[in-house]
Image (cartoon, rainbow, N blue to C red):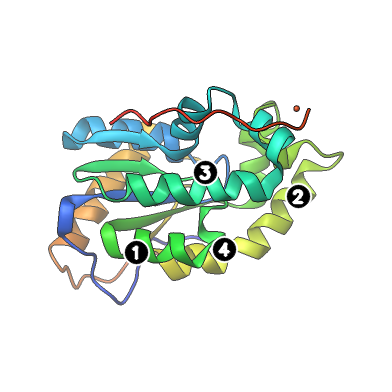
Amino acid sequence: MNSDTPSTAGAPAAGENIFLVGLMGAGKTSVGKLLARRLGKSFCDCDQEIERATGVRIPTVFEIEGEAGFRARERKMLAELTQRSGIVLATGGGAVLCAENRAALRERGTVVYLCATPHELWQRTRHDRNRPLLQTPNPLAKLTALFNERDALYREVAHLVVDTGSQSVGALATRLEQKLTQLAGGSSRAPESQPRSTLATKTCAP
């Protein structure tokens, strides 16, 4: 992964939304916040919106409802968030597993895949206890398995693939701005080398 690659299809202009996809630790939230501020857009984080709606942290959703329950909430939340206009949205790492989610993302905004190697992702997430799927004896092996499972799906849905590497958040946001400008302009330049119960649901903040 040593290049930024635009897909062959142009990005949709409707709503001027930017949707960030990628594995946990890719930088979707940190980069998304900065990018939204620079572009004058609103920032949304799908996981944070689920936490706001349920009143509990994501690990608790997993503990009470399991991954299937979480994915159902995620699907419903993404359907709502992608209907908004003028946002930068950080999606959860597993959002692309659902074809319905992939279609909504692809059709309602410009999708950017923030790509990093499993080892880079492990270095960024190894001290984070708020990631249920990584609470295993070998988080690096889990990240590798997730990467192998999801990389093709991220690439399928993305209008732009950006290698995050070891760049700072600021540098990455700047490069992403440039790539989005080129994509929107149709540039033809070659790419650079808990116990079980039912959780409450609150209204998602607009």
Q: Position of residue 104 (x, y in %)?
A: 36, 61
User: Which numbered disc, 1 or 3, marks the residue that appears first in the sequence?
Assistant: 3
Neighbourhood count class around disc 3 (C-alpha, 10 Å): few under 14, some 14–19, many 20 upward: many
Residue 141 percent location from the top left of the image: 79, 50
What kind of element bears circle 4?
helix
Question: Where is residue 177 drawn, in percent x and y?
Answer: 24, 46
Q: Are marks 1 and 2 in contact (CB under 8 Å)?
A: no
| Label placed on residue 26 | 3
Amino acid residing under circle 4: Asp
- Amino acid at the residue labelled 3: Ala
* Residue lying at 53% horizontally and 62% vertically, measured from the top left: 98
Q: Tag 2 or tag 1, which sits nearer the N-term?
A: 1
Whether residue 159 appears in this view of the structure is: no
Q: Label 4: which residue?
A: 151
Q: Residue at x 28, y 75 (%)?
A: 9
Q: Give me the disc on residue 106.
A: 1
In the rendered view, tell whether residue 54 sits above or below residue 144.
Answer: above
| Label ID, residue 142 | 2
Q: Nearer the viewer, residue 26 or 53?
A: 53
Q: Nearer the viewer, mark 1 or mark 2?
A: 1
